[in-house]
Image: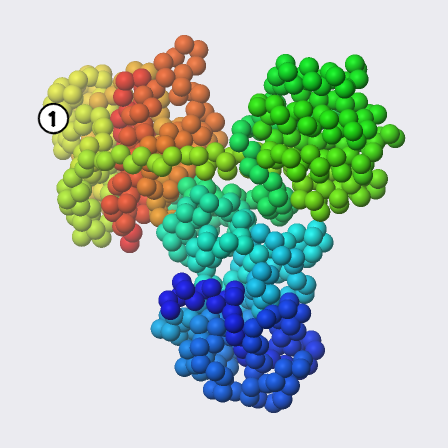
């Protein structure tokens, strides 16, 4: 059996040994045995304790060596010093899986780290599927398996949840018990020594009892595997995750705009976007989405119909809808005519459909049956305020009845508290999401619709990039051979040419005469830039002069730039100046860069140049590799996209030229793992073309 096969033994074991089982109530080893029994576990449960004869009515095995061979699972709750010897003994008994609840491993320091490494070696050698250490345990409700020390046991359901935080597991479990929400699997990953979120996604993708997957993560250590597994599972089941630790510690040391702005949180957001994982930004949203996805069908369009007994709340819900990617469904004439047959003349027949404050349950039922038939309606939000004549329980019954006859999602906003609470519970128990506020419900519907669109999205197109890797390799190897960690512009120009990237006409001048000759050949006006492998921030030394209109201006600029650079950076080798053609008229400046993320690899960045990136942080991110749709999406995501599209009669820029540069940078990043950051800044673009006017490449030390 492989590690992948043995994961099944964690959830549906036929034989389980609890190593460190205890007869003393309150001890973790006692709670685990009690939880297994209370869950109705149907397999063979063996407590292991050298000093006891019987625990909770079960005969006790004194030592691991006396256990039968081929155990499906061992739950380990012994002191930390005894964990590795216990696992060594279990490996000899050919155990298939293990849950190590004991703490005191890499989370406590060097000695604990060494112990954890030994556990990893054992599990790798013997293909043991291990959860933990330092975890709460796991639950598989459909297998009557509660190998945890959690307080409480959830109902059977279709939601699977895994978490790096045991405390969060406890909170989610308590919520589930209070809301009567069912779970299929419940896993505390702990230190993720062997089984991690990628393994869980792979397993849960084919689990017949799971239809929705929730996850809490603090970090991902195997980014490529996570992306591969997540992309597969989201085509079949929604994956909703909450990610903590959203700050970036290393940004201050970055050498470029990209490096300073692109942090770990942007990388995770890009990874979730690339794979279709739904990100919940807070626990309330995680709970709302879990309930929505597990109980309602996906809306197959953006059209939302609001049915209410109060005009004001209906308008507020309509406002929230218009701010989302949903729209207020335009009801057909036949729908309106049908409603006229039974609604009072003072009711509003248009979306929102206002049934008026005296609406009885029967009026709700008839209206819902009619609007559900409208092809422009893809989802329904029912609002009820507790007016004096509102039939709260009867209306809930009517909504439940109608929901059983449709494949369109229905959400309910029962406003208020004390009077509406019984109706809220009825609806929730029937699997209809119900809230006292409309906004979270609309957010859930929008998220479900966006996931529906994700499922319909065709596979990405990845255009072939023509390049000469060997030519670029020579430039990078030469820089590394000299101990350089940066390939500055006059050297990096060769890399750009090797990748067929559009660049301004450029020449390297070692003297003022050469500068004038180069300018004559290029054509005036020109730009002069200092050329030095030690000076990457040229403007810091006054190393750039623009719009030089004649030979005298070029000659003076050459002397001024080189003299200033030598005075301000006496240690730098001055190779001369780059002479470059001026940007064509009507150009806009954009910035394209990437930073290599430790988990997920190259993180591409796009934005407008100048103040837009430095002050407004108007930027978008994607992970490599970049497909054509990715390139289109990253451009259109920035708020200032309309400036590129053209305003007040301006022509739009050449978007395909920008896309081509983005895709090429993505390939450059994948071709050379030693490049940790690169930046094209600015890229000058107009209606005809885009050119990379400046480049910086940073190498690993």
Q: Nearer the viewer, residue 580 or 304?
A: 304
Percent across and percent down for residue 114 are 42, 74
- Residue behind mark 1: 513
Percent across and percent down for residue 123 are 40, 72
Q: What residue is rendered at 21% in x and 51% in y?
A: 480
Q: Nearer the viewer, residue 73 or 514?
A: 73
Find numbered disc 1 in the image and state the secondary structure of the residue it sits on: helix
Q: Nearer the viewer, residue 65 or 144?
A: 144
Tell me if residue 66 comes above or below residue 201 in the rendering: below
Q: Nearer the viewer, residue 449 or 559?
A: 449
Percent across and percent down for residue 376 are 57, 23
Tell me if residue 604 comes above or below residue 597 in the rendering: above
Q: What residue is rendered at 57% in x and 23% in y?
A: 375
Describe residue 23's horizontal placement relative to residue 235 as left or right.
Answer: right
Describe residue 391's horizontal placement relative to residue 407 as left or right.
Answer: right
Describe residue 161's horizontal placement relative to residue 90 as left or right.
Answer: right
Q: Total number of numbered labels? A: 1
């Amino acid at each position: 059996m492989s590690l992948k096969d043995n994961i099944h033994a964690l959830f549906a074991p036929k034989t389980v040994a609890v190593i460190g089982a205890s007869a003393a109530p309150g001890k973790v080893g006692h709670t685990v045995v009690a939880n297994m029994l209370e869950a109705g576990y149907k397999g063979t449960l063996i407590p292991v304790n050298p000093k006891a004869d019987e625990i909770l009515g079960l005969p006790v095995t004194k030592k691991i060596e006396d256990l039968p061979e081929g155990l499906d699972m061992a739950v380990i709750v012994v002191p930390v010093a005894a964990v590795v010897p216990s696992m060594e003994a279990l490996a000899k008994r050919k155990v298939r899986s293990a849950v190590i609840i004991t703490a005191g491993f890499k989370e406590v320091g060097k000695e604990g780290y060494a112990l954890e490494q030994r556990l990893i070696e054992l599990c790798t050698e013997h293909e043991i599927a291990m959860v933990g250490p330092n975890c709460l345990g796991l639950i598989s409700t459909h297998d009557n398996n509660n190998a945890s020390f959690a307080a409480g046991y959830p109902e059977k359901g279709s939601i699977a949840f895994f978490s790096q935080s045991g405390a969060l597991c406890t909170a989610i479990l308590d919520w589930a018990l209070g809301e009567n929400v069912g779970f299929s699997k419940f896993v505390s990953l702990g230190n993720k020594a062997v089984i991690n979120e990628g393994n869980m996604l792979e397993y849960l993708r084919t689990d017949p009892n799971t239809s929705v997957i929730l996850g809490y993560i603090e970090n991902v250590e195997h980014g490529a595997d996570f992306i591969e597994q997540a992309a597969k599972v989201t085509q079949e089941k929604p994956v909703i995750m909450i990610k903590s630790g959203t700050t970036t510690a290393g940004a201050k040391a970055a050498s470029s705009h990209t490096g300073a702005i692109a942090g770990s949180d942007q990388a995770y957001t890009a990874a979730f976007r690339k794979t279709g994982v739904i990100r919940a930004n807070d626990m309330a949203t995680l709970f709302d989405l879990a309930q929505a996805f597990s109980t309602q069908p996906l809306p197959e369009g953006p059209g939302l119909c609001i049915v209410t007994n109060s005009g004001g709340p209906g308008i507020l819900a309509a406002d929230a809808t218009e701010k989302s990617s949903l729209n207020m469904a335009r009801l057909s004439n036949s729908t309106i005519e049908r409603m006229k047959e039974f609604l009072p003349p003072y009711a509003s027949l248009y979306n929102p459909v206002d049934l008026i404050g005296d609406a009885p349950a029967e009026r709700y039922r008839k209206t819902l049956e009619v609007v559900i038939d409208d092809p422009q309606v893809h989802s329904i939000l029912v609002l009820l305020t507790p007016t004096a004549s509102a039939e709260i329980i009867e209306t809930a019954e009517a909504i439940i009845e109608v929901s059983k006859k449709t494949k369109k999602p229905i959400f309910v906003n029962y406003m208020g508290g004390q009077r509406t609470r019984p109706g809220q519970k009825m609806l929730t128990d029937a699997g209809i999401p119900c809230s006292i506020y409309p906004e979270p419900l609309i957010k859930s519907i929008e998220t479900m619709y966006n996931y529906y669109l994700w499922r319909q999205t065709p596979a990405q197109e990845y255009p072939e990039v023509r390049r000469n890797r060997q030519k670029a390799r020579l430039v990078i190897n030469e820089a590394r051979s000299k101990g350089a960690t940066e390939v500055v512009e006059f050297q990096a120009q060769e890399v750009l040419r090797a990748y067929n990237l559009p660049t301004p006409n450029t020449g390297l001048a070692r003297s003022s005469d050469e500068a004038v000759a180069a300018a004559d050949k290029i054509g005036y006006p020109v730009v002069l830039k200092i050329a030095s492998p030690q000076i990457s921030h040229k403007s810091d030394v006054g190393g750039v002069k623009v719009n030089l209109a004649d030979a005298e201006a070029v000659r003076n600029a050459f002397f001024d730039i080189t003299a200033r650079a030598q005075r301000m950076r006496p240690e730098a080798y001055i190779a001369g100046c780059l002479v470059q053609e001026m940007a064509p008229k009507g150009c806009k400046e954009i910035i394209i860069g990437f930073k290599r993320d430790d988990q997920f690899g190259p993180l591409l960045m796009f934005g407008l140049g100048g103040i837009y990136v430095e002050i407004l942080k108007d930027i978008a991110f994607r992970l490599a590799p970049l497909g054509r749709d990715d390139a289109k999406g990253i451009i259109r995501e920035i708020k200032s996209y309309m400036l590129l599209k053209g305003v007040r009669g301006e022509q739009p820029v050449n978007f395909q030229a920008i896309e081509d540069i983005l895709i090429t940078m993505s390939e450059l990043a994948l071709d050379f793992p030693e490049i940790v950051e690169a930046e094209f800044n600015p890229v000058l673009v107009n209606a005809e073309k885009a050119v990379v006017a400046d480049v910086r490449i940073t190498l690993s030390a």
